[in-house]
Image (cartoon, rainbow, N blue to C red):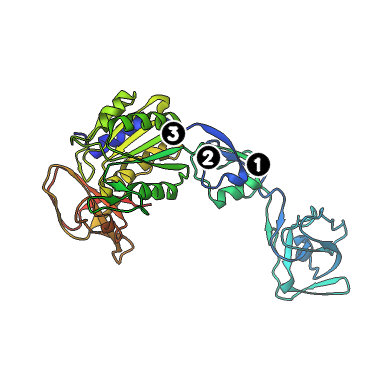
């Protein structure tokens, strides 16, 4: 079977980029930018005053002038006043206003006294050119790149886009995702549950994690372990959605119809099975219209772990996000894992007292123990080529969203 690294590589090789669309700026929060944002003019677009006070020429102060005639008052949003050619003039000015063209500095109110149209500098006031002025183009020049493609848009990027006049942005379309739980033993959360049944949890958990990761267009389905139902319903789901996540029916049991049904529906299998625990039966394929199909094991911990190890990185790449290298942490305690499989081990992070973090193993009772994940931050991946992992072992860490 494939290693987790090889399985991830095959997924990333085969998954297709999502289409692009024009998105109004007001709706762009959380989207992935596909065309860069460049400055449409110098930023700031003029010499911008950063303190309330008086705009004047530093050369006048250098020449010994300490008293100035106030030529006028200028607020933010007003056209710039002029000082005139005569020395000893100033303009009372507010934060955010355009600096008068014949001034080169601003003296804050606190360093002056003023009355009857006259301003006097305090004896200790030190004046220099450029003081309290945000110089034109000192942030970005017109045409310079500010926000590169592949950025997830937050309030900061939205502010930049607005300041650059971007009423619409080119972003990745958000994929329509189907989350399909399979199994005769499953009942809805608010339904009557018999002793031999369990309540649905996988589809709720996967949906919540996908939304937290930035993929809100999700619909949930439940299908029974009946081949004709699987064939009929999955045909419609594959025709409607961009990404399909299946949980259950993917192993080697008598009623695990999923691999055969997917093949009949024209989904090309890329691989089936990864040398890991939990999640060994994990299946991935590509359907018509380049629909990505992830068939996750039905056990809750397996499904949730495979979502974070494989599905979320694949969606990130297809959306246009740059690939992220997993962070590494050190095990806080020794781990023994004897099967020749990679171990995807839930852990709790803790500060190590030196500015870093360690990972304390928090194994669940079984791959059905969803509650066992509550006191964990994510999981580490321990390779299959070893059985003993002493404290201090460095491992890749994947955080739950």
Q: Is residue 330 above or below residue 313?
A: below
Determine whether, in the image, residue 190 is placed left or right of residue 111.
left
Q: Which residue is mark 1?
A: 167
Q: CA distance from mark 3 to mark 2?
A: 22 Å
Can you tell which mark lies on residue 241? Answer: 3
Locate residue 302, reporting x and y percent: 26, 46
Badge 1 element: loop
- Disc 3 packing (10 Å; few <14; some 14–19; many ≥20): some
Instruction: Please state which of the two labelled residues, at mark 1 or mark 3, is closer to the viewer.
Output: 3
Residue 156 placement (x, y as % from top left):
56, 51
Q: Position of residue 388 (x, y in %)?
A: 12, 51
Residue at x 56%, y 52% (from the top left corner): 155
- Residue displayed at 35% across by 49% down: 188
- Please tell me which of labels 1 and 3 falls first in the chain: 1
Q: Position of residue 253 (x, y in %)?
A: 18, 36
Tell me the quarter of the picture where residue 59 sits.
bottom right
Q: Residues within 10 Å of mark 1 (few under 14, many from 20)?
A: few
Distance of mark 1 from mark 2, alpha carbons? 14 Å
Tell me whether circle 1 and circle 2 mark residues in contact (CB < 8 Å). Answer: no
Q: Label 2 belongs to which residue?
A: 33
Which of 117/251 is in front? 251
């Amino acid at each position: 079977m494939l290693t987790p690294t090889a399985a991830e590589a095959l997924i990333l090789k085969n998954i297709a980029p999502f289409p692009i669309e024009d998105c109004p700026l007001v709706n762009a929060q959380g989207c992935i930018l596909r065309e860069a944002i460049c400055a449409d003019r110098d930023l700031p677009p003029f010499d911008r005053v950063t303190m309330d006070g008086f705009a004047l020429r530093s050369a006048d102060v250098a020449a010994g002038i300490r008293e100035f005639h106030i030529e006028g008052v200028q607020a933010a949003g007003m056209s710039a006043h002029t000082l005139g050619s005569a020395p000893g003039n100033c303009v009372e000015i507010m934060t955010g206003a355009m600096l008068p063209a014949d001034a080169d500095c601003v003296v804050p109110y606190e360093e002056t006294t003023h009355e009857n149209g006259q301003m006097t500098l305090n004896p200790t006031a030190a004046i220099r050119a450029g003081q309290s002025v945000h110089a034109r183009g000192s942030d970005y020049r017109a045409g310079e790149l500010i926000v590169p493609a592949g950025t997830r848009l937050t309030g900061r990027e939205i502010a930049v886009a607005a300041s650059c006049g971007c009423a619409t942005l080119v972003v990745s379309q958000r994929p329509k995702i189907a989350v399909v739980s399979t199994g005769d033993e499953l009942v809805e959360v608010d339904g009557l549950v018999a002793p031999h049944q369990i309540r649905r949890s996988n589809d709720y958990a996967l949906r919540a994690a996908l939304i937290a990761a930035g993929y809100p267009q999700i619909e949930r389905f439940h299908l029974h372990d009946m081949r004709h139902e699987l064939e009929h319903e999955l045909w419609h789901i594959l025709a409607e959605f961009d990404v399909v996540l299946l949980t259950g029916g993917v192993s080697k049991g008598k009623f695990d119809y999923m691999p055969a049904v997917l093949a009949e529906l024209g989904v090309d299998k890329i691989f089936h099975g990864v040398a890991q625990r939990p999640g060994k039966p994990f299946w991935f394929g590509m359907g018509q219209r380049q629909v990505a199909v992830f068939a996750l094991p039905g056990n809750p911990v397996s499904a949730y772990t495979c979502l974070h190890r494989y599905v979320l990185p694949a969606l990130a790449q297809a959306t246009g996000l740059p690939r992220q290298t997993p962070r590494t942490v050190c095990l806080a305690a020794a781990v023994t894992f004897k099967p020749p499989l990679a171990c995807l081990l839930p852990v709790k992070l803790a500060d190590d007292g030196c500015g870093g973090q360690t990972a304390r193993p928090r194994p669940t009772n079984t791959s059905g123990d969803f509650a066992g994940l509550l006191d964990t931050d994510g999981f580490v991946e321990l390779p299959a080529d070893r059985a003993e992992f002493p404290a201090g072992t460095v491992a890749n860490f994947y955080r739950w969203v």
